[in-house]
Image: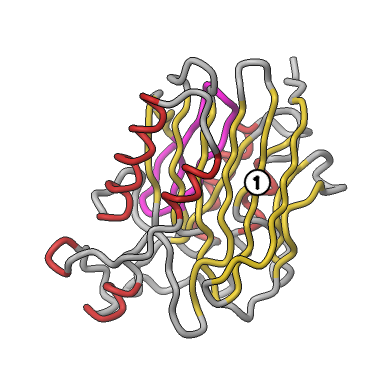
Amino acid sequence: MCLVLLNHGKHPVYPLIVAANRDEFYDRPAAPAHIWEQPAGLVAGKDLTGGGTWLGLTHSGRFGALTNVRRPDVPPPPVARTRGGIVTDLLDDSVPIEQTLERLSEQGNQYDLYNVIAGMPGRLVYETNQSPGSFSEIPAGTHGLSNAMLNSPWPKVEHGVELLSRIADDVCPIDPDALFEILGIAEPFPDSHLPDTGVGPDLERSLSPLFIHMSGYGTRCQTVILVDRDARATFIERSFVDGKCTNEERLTFQIRFQR
């Protein structure tokens, strides 16, 4: 997952709005979004190599999403645990989210660098192993996460947040296709606006669009989530192969929040 745009706690109809792109190598196998047996009630795609996921929503209202961190100067742990397991752990209703986040804060050095957003509509938290410390609550409003810290001023993040903010401020009801249009923006940004993450200017430019299409690597799926005030959830995932949409999964369900 390389871009997560979200609005939470401010819209009059939707306490949670999510638009996200997963970027990955084309030859890494994955299953499209479906209802998992374990953790029970989880709606998510599945990485068939590591066994975890990059983004999901449960029937009890838990949300989680993970992005990798682009820091080629930081070596991975000698034996790194799969980062996709972080999301499935956070979306396991049998363990409080805070308990899982506290464990992650203590064991973050066992993973390659990551960012994670987790919580429920109305209360989301952010955690990363880029620097030691506890997780922090995300203020209500519109936020963006790519492969640096939350709300880092990368062009794709700032542009995505601006466009999602316009929709969240002015449009009701929200048309999922308007969110997919944001996720489909494939134009690179000017070199002068790009971050320097140590991968060189050519690759930096190729990775700069919201929607990435490169040789062997690019946006593999797009996900839009809308949770309304009546706790009705809409989860739409579009899969891509070599830049072309090949499949759409649309799941709607009633969230039953745990007491």
Question: Which sits in the foreground, 4 or 133?
Answer: 4
Placement of the C terminus among the 4 image quadrants: top right
**Image spot of residue 244 (x, y percent):** 56, 71
Q: Is residue 131 above or below residue 78?
A: above
Q: Is residue 73 above or below residue 131?
A: below
- Tell me if residue 185 is in the magenta stretch: no
Is residue 38 rendered to the left or right of residue 33? right
Q: Which residues are magenta?
A: 115-135
Question: Residue at 51% across / 83% down in the picture?
Answer: 216
The kind of residue tagged 1 is Ile
Question: Residue at 48% across / 23% down in the picture?
Answer: 172
Q: Residue furthest bottom?
A: 215
Question: Which sits in the foreground, 95 or 256?
Answer: 256
Is residue 246 rendered to the left or right of residue 167? right
Mark 1: secondary structure: strand
Badge 1 is on which residue?
Answer: 236
Is residue 45 rendered to the left or right of residue 144? right
- Tell me if residue 133 is in the magenta stretch: yes
**Image spot of residue 112 (x, y percent):** 49, 65
